[in-house]
Amino acid sequence: MANLRHRAIETNALDHDAVCKTCWAKTLSFCEPHHTESLRGFFDSATCLKVNPGTVFIHDGAKFPYYFNINRGATRSFKILPDGRRQILSFGFPGTLIGLSQYSNFEFNIEAINEVSLCRFSKDKVDYYSNKHPELRKSLMERMIYELSESYAHAVALGKMSARERLAYFLIKQNKADYKIYGQLNKVTLPMNRYDISDYLGVTTETISRTFTQFESEGLITFIKSSEIILRDRRRLATLAAGAIAASPAW
């Protein structure tokens, strides 16, 4: 059974201007092109928060009329089934915008994997300013379409791919995220653990470990440490993952 630690949200308010000036994810975020004087009120309305590792800061079914933009750290979004099994729906990284549904209730839990800093925007404020500023609305729509396409790719992986293909898809997807965030061409950083990966890909933890070992013995990857991998043959991994890659944008 998944260990769902429902704890009180442990957040500390951060200075918004300081966060914007030092935000190393701003080139990945929906808000970066819109830091203009006409949208000053929109950004001043944001609340900047810090979330402690292991904190479930959004609960399934909770009313949370906000968008969250991740500035630093990683999150996991997941559902707990009636029998206690966990399905991880997605991982969030710097630049990820959370809460794109138009409904005020979240339909899943979101937990901080490590220490996470994020900006929280009221959906009412977002609606108000995006109606007055079409360029802001366009950025939000582009982000929504991107996230939907990523969900399609995940569905393809879960529905039709073997364990090897699923893990190859995950590594290529994670490598893509690392390249965007850190500029690392063939390196994969894994803030999540093996249980997270297995619950994301829909296979057992033993299968994930065994497939990692196979990939390493075949010269596809090399572990620097348990949380860092070098892709030695990205082309072969991409070929294995081709079905899901084709369904995902901007590969």
Image (cartoon, helix red, strand yellow):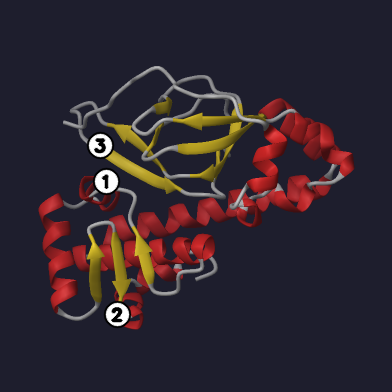
Q: Taking 190 as reference, is 31 above or below it?
A: above
Q: Taking 188 as reference, is 118 above or below it?
A: above
* Dot 3 amino acid type: Arg
Query: Where does the image place residue 188, in percent across and percent down from the top left?
Result: 36, 64
Query: Where does the image place residue 200, in percent across and percent down from the top left?
Result: 30, 49
The front one of 161 and 116 is 116
Quadrant position of residue 206: bottom left
Q: Taking 41 as reference, is 229 above or below it?
A: below
Residue at (54, 68) in percent of width and height: 250
* Dot 2 amino acid type: Arg
Q: CA distance from mark 1 to mark 3?
A: 9 Å
Quadrant position of residue 146: bottom right
* Dot 1 amino acid type: Asp
Which is closer to the viewer, label 1 or label 3? 1
Where is mark 3, residue-wise? 86
Where is mark 1, residue-wise? 196
Query: Where does the image place residue 95, in percent across and percent down from the top left?
Result: 57, 50
